[in-house]
Image: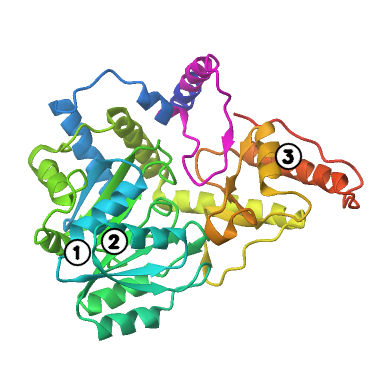
Amino acid sequence: MENLKNSARVLGYIKGILNYKETPGYVLLNPGPVLTTPRVKAALVHHDTCHRDTDFAVLVRNLRSKLKKVFRGDERHEVVLITGSGTSGIEATISSTIPEDKKILVLINGAFGERYREVATVHRLNMEVLDFGWCNPMDVSAVEAKLAADPEICAVMLAHHETSVGLINPIGEIGAICRRYDRLLLVDAVSSLGAEDLDVVRDNIDICLSSANKAMQAIAGVAFVCVNDRAWKVIETVRPRVYYLDLKRYRKYAIEEELTPFTPAVNGFFALDAAVDELLEDGVESRWELYRERNRFLRENFLSMGLTFLDVAGQRSSTLTIVKVPEYITYSELYDRMKGYGFIIYGCKGILTDTYFQIANMGDLSDEMLQSFVNTLQFVLYRARREAGLAADMVEEPKVVDAIR
């Protein structure tokens, strides 16, 4: 009860501060950055701290240890913290891991798979690609055949949750194959850590990267990479290709000083620490179930409005829904109208641009916010149908409930 009182008090202070801001607040239904709790927001307001002080080293040490629990790592794993978006973790992983005489195998079924290919190309890495096409599940047998046929491939890179198409990829199956052929498995868990079932030991993941501003429910600007001893042995043989994102450098500082090699986003670290505490206190599995329940609620309501989803085969995400834009309204019109009522939705990438939109259910979203969003979307679509001269499906015009922000 005391924690609830303190949370309410902090939220009151924060709302008072935000009232002085010129920009309005919105309910964020984009797949990161997400809405944060009062506790996370409060952690941002911290006494100025030296990033080389022993007190900050204590924070870094504890944060690394707690993040290892979220990854479900063991004594063979180390977590390093990088100031940057999730893509900084992607580039650090790819550029630090592939020896000059070896290859990386990139698996693609959406926009982020294509990003790995772009990063590998920038660093002039020897590369093989299995492109399964957007929205398609990965063929595990094709991955095995590729590894069996090419001993020069030393690592496989893929997304756990390919956010652009809402697919969960079979990292456990691919991890078992990689271990059988003694190859490294590199996994982008930027939008799945804290939201989907992931275990770096069980799934044989050698390097797993994520970031603070999605299902971890912290603020943007901090990435983290969980690396096991098998991968460190390979990384130690690789000549650095980058300065800022060299994983060896981060490991050295983490082990020797429990610090980062460069000035970090200090307040972002404090906010992430608070967010990880919330996750561990609630239970990682409880967070998974919360997201699944929210996702079911939204999907059921979308179906009741006559909306349809992106047709994908395989396991769908529990953190977002990809919805087809109705023919009687454009995505830009839908975005603007929903923003006018206080809700931020998200456009799709690549071949799905302007045809589909994303609704994420990550972050500190209350039941009231989600119900308000559903009511507002129903109202906006009703009005759009009327404007397009279509017969309204409902006798009465739906009511808009103000977003609770």
| Residue named by callout 2 | 120
The answer to whether marks 3 and 2 mark residues whose Cβ atoms lie closer than 8 Å is no
Q: Nearer the viewer, mark 2 or mark 1?
A: 2
Q: Residue at x 86, y 44 (%)?
A: 387
Residue 278, percent across and down? 39, 38
Residue type at tag 2: Ala
- The region drawn magenta spans 10-39
Q: Quadrant of residue 82?
A: top left
| Residue named by callout 1 | 98
Q: Is residue 29 visible?
A: yes
| Residue named by callout 3 | 376
Instruction: Compare marks 2 and 1 and give the one earlier in the sequence.
Output: 1
Residue 88, percent across and down? 30, 47
- Label 2 crowd (10 A; few <14 / some 14-19 / many >=20): many
Q: Residue at x 63, y 56 (%)?
A: 356
- Label 1 crowd (10 A; few <14 / some 14-19 / many >=20): many
Residue nearest the observer in this picture, 219 or 131: 131
- Count of residue discs: 3
The answer to whether marks 2 and 1 mark residues whose Cβ atoms lie closer than 8 Å is yes
| Looking at the image, residue 52 lies above or below residue 80 | above
Instruction: Compare marks 3 and 2 and give the one earlier in the sequence.
Output: 2
Q: Residue at x 70, y 54 (%)?
A: 302
Residue 233, percent across and down? 11, 62
Callout 3 secondary element: helix
